[in-house]
Image (spheres, rainbow, N blue to C red):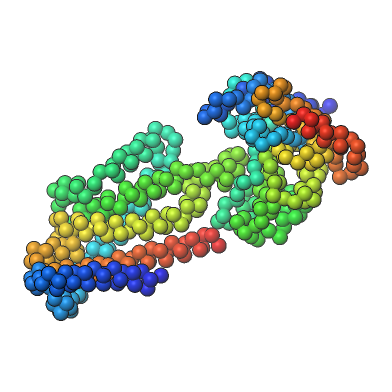
Amino acid sequence: MSQANRRQITMLIECNDLNYRYPSSQANLFRNLSCRISIPGFHALFGPSGVGKTTLAKMIAGLVEGFSGKITVHPDTGILYTYNLERLPGWSLAKDHLADITPHDRMPDLKKLTESFGIQGCLESRFSKLSLGQQNRMNLTRYLLQDFNFLIMDESLANVDEATREVIILQIKQLFPQKAFLYISHNVMEVAKFCKIILVLRSADKSPQITEIKGQNQTDQDIPDHPALEQTMLEIVHAS
Amino acid sequence: MLHRRLYQFFIVYGIGICSLFSIKYILNLSDYVIPSPIEVWLTAVDVFMRYSVNVLDTLSVAIIGHVLSIFMAIVVGIIARLTTGIGTLIKIAAFNIQAYPIVAVAPIIFILLGDGLASRLLIASMICYFPLLLSILGILTQPVSDIEHFFQMTGRMTWQLEVKIRIFENISKLIMVITGSATLAMVGTIVAEFIAANAGIGYTIRIALYQSDLAKILVALFIIGISTSIYLVCLEWMGHMLQKKWEG
């Protein structure tokens, strides 16, 4: 077994007995929450609004502290967290910013990503001049050009139309088969169809607070299996 | 931009001087208390050039003091945005010192530095420095998370980039604050000259005050108003050009 393959299997993010409440709140957001995320794979974190998806994602990314329990991350796991409200600096054109932040060896990927995400025509513009959907795609592109093993996409494509979103997800899965993604979305159909594992998060008064559901994990090569997809969607709805 | 500001000044000045003459004629005050319009005009013809030179002297001190205070406020603001003890100390000190009327310290400065350029410059800087510092502190200590997040996540954030992002995102506010503080710099310089200087329009007003010559004071105020308006317009124009160039 090659070293790369061995690493694939061992790389894992584990959350054990997480307990957390916001400093201003009396109620617990998480109570003994435990989950595992394997690398690689395109996974989802699903759940109703306010249940703590973003907080959990930020905890995994190391952006939230003050919780009890343990989050174990493989030392080599470069984790990035991106969200849909991010902006690029307004003083430069999108292409100049992308050129500045893209590592030299990733330059060919920059061209490939801008083409497949349909933002080539936006490169000569400043970020503020782009539509919300274009802004989402531009922001996601720059993250995909970074050195990472695990990318958390917190509603990163919220303003992108459904058809384009599907193309982008399939492209990501095709271009980054060795990486892991945690896609936070409210779209049951989307997560059921494209994700490998769907972590369904519920409120702290329910036990277990998080449920793991196997998704259809479709690629652009697969023929859609509608009954199986419907079954997965039902499971997700039931779990949430 | 210039004509609008000048119109505004002419209207305010006109209202002020009309009110003054109204009081004079309603209360039947003598020319010694409030001079007649003709006397004001004759005084203007007589002293306009000399007073203009004095105002330019004051304005140049105010501009230097203003530039110095902007520079100092940015440097201190950059240090104060640190979350360390020094940053906290600077913020607390700035909030406390700005609550004190700086003009009250002016006599001490004149005693220590004499009535030359240094005292005028220092007082002008001090008067516009603290309001500037508080605004710049507010801008530089407020994170712009939507933009900064990426650079922090990818380990690219430097203090220079952080300052650049925060200044860029607040450029309109910053230009407004700098323009607003320009008036304070002018006020500071005139106050300094008024207290104990040997040059500038404040010094000239002090002499006119000793002579109880209101006409000279009115002429001085007119020239001060025009020159300050021009300075403010120049600042607004520079800010506008910078913003246009930066934002594309």
> Residue drawn at (18%, 69%), measured in percent from left and top?
B20
Task: Reply above or below: A224 against A33.
Answer: below
- In the picture, measured across the screen, residue A119 lies left or right of residue B243, that is right
* Residue at the extreme front: B26
The answer to which image quadrant residue A30 occupies is: top right
- On the question of residue B180 being in view, the answer is yes
Task: Reply above or below: A203 against B170.
Answer: above
- In the picture, measured across the screen, residue A183 lies left or right of residue A85, that is right
Where does the N terminus of chain B fall, quadrant-wise?
A: bottom left
> Residue drawn at (35%, 50%), measured in percent from left and top?
B132
Q: Which of A117 and A49 is in front in this view?
A: A49
- On the question of residue A145 being in view, the answer is no
> Where's residue B163, x and y in %?
48, 47
> Residue drawn at (44%, 45%), measured in percent from left and top?
B140
- In the picture, measured across the screen, residue B32 lies left or right of residue B88, that is left
> Residue drawn at (8%, 66%), measured in percent from left and top?
B211
- Number of marks drawn: 0
Q: Which of A69 and B68 is in front in this view?
A: A69
- In the picture, measured across the screen, residue B204 lies left or right of residue A8, that is left
> Where's residue A113, x and y in %?
74, 50
> Where's residue A230, x and y in %?
86, 37
Task: Reply above or below: A158 against B179.
Answer: above
The answer to which image quadrant residue B138 occupies is: top left
> Where's residue A42, x and y in %?
77, 36
Where does the C terminus of chain B fall, quadrant-wise?
A: bottom right
Q: Nearer the viewer, residue B102 or B12?
A: B12
